[in-house]
């Protein structure tokens, strides 16, 4: 019986091990972590798959609402006070997550695996006790 309980515990931990770092791997930086748009753009250009969600509208420009450094190298600078970039599509209301997707599915799969392992462990213990009582 102790072997079964140990096996179930090992299976449960093994099922959760691949998920242990997934919550933090996808979102290391936020736009508020950068003083300027250019600083955020440098991080974005290191990995344009955008695991940090710095480019919400997928136009290749990270953290557009952050202030510019004012270095004068930007060809998009406009002092007229008018909007210089009109985004395509509707507003992304999202679900509160900054992950690009798949995070919920991995969490559900891991939780399901743990519940299945615990259920199997409970069934195994109950079956072992029933055999001992006979």
Image: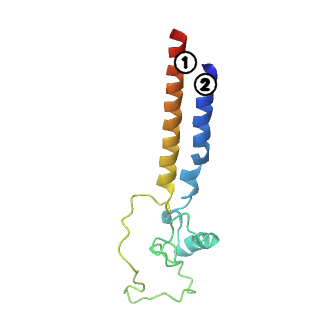
Image coords of residue 54 (percent x, y): 51, 68
Q: Name the residue located 36 percent from the left edge and 65 percent from the top edge.
A: 93
Whether 16 is drawn above or below 82: the answer is above
Q: Quadrant of the N terminus?
A: top right
In-front residue for pair 22/53? 22
10 Å neighbourhood of mark 2: few (<14), some, or many (≥20)? some
Q: CA distance from mark 2 to mark 1?
A: 9 Å
Q: Name the residue located 42 percent from the left edge and 88 percent from the top edge.
A: 79
Whether 82 is drawn above or below 89: the answer is below
Query: What is the image's colouring?
Result: rainbow
Image coords of residue 90 (percent x, y): 35, 75
Residue under circle 1? 128
Nearer-N-terminus badge (2/1): 2
Q: Which mark is residue 62?
A: none
Whether 67 is drawn above or below 3: the answer is below
Image coords of residue 51 (percent x, y): 56, 64
Q: With 95 as the anchor, is 119 left or right in this view?
A: right
10 Å neighbourhood of mark 1: few (<14), some, or many (≥20)? few
Q: Which SS class for mark 1?
A: helix
Q: Which SS class for mark 2?
A: helix
In-front residue for pair 76/80? 76
Q: Name the residue located 42 percent from the left edge and 84 percent from the top edge.
A: 85
In-front residue for pair 80/57? 57
Image coords of residue 4 (percent x, y): 60, 25
Callouts 2 and 1 close, C-beta under 8 Å = yes
Residue under circle 2? 4
In-front residue for pair 40/70? 40
- Which numbered mark, 2 or 1, is in the foreground of this view? 1
Given the current orientation, which residue lies at the most extreme front position?
Answer: 134
Whether 83 is drawn above or below 43: the answer is below
Q: With 121 as the anchor, is 84 left or right in this view?
A: left
Given the current orientation, which residue lies at the most extreme top position?
Answer: 134
């Amino acid at each position: 019986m102790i072997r079964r309980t140990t096996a179930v515990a090992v299976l449960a931990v093994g099922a959760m091990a691949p998920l242990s770092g997934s919550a933090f791997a996808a979102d290391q930086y936020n736009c508020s972590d950068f003083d300027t748009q250019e600083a955020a753009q440098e991080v974005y250009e290191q990995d344009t798959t955008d695991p940090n969600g710095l480019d919400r509208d997928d136009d290749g420009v990270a953290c557009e609402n952050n202030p510019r450094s004012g270095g004068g190298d930007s060809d998009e600078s406009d002092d007229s006070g008018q909007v210089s970039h009109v985004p395509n599509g509707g507003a992304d209301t999202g679900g509160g997550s900054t992950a690009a997707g798949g995070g919920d599915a991995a969490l559900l799969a891991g939780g399901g695996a743990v519940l299945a392992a615990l259920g199997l462990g409970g069934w195994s213990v109950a079956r072992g006790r029933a055999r001992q009582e006979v």
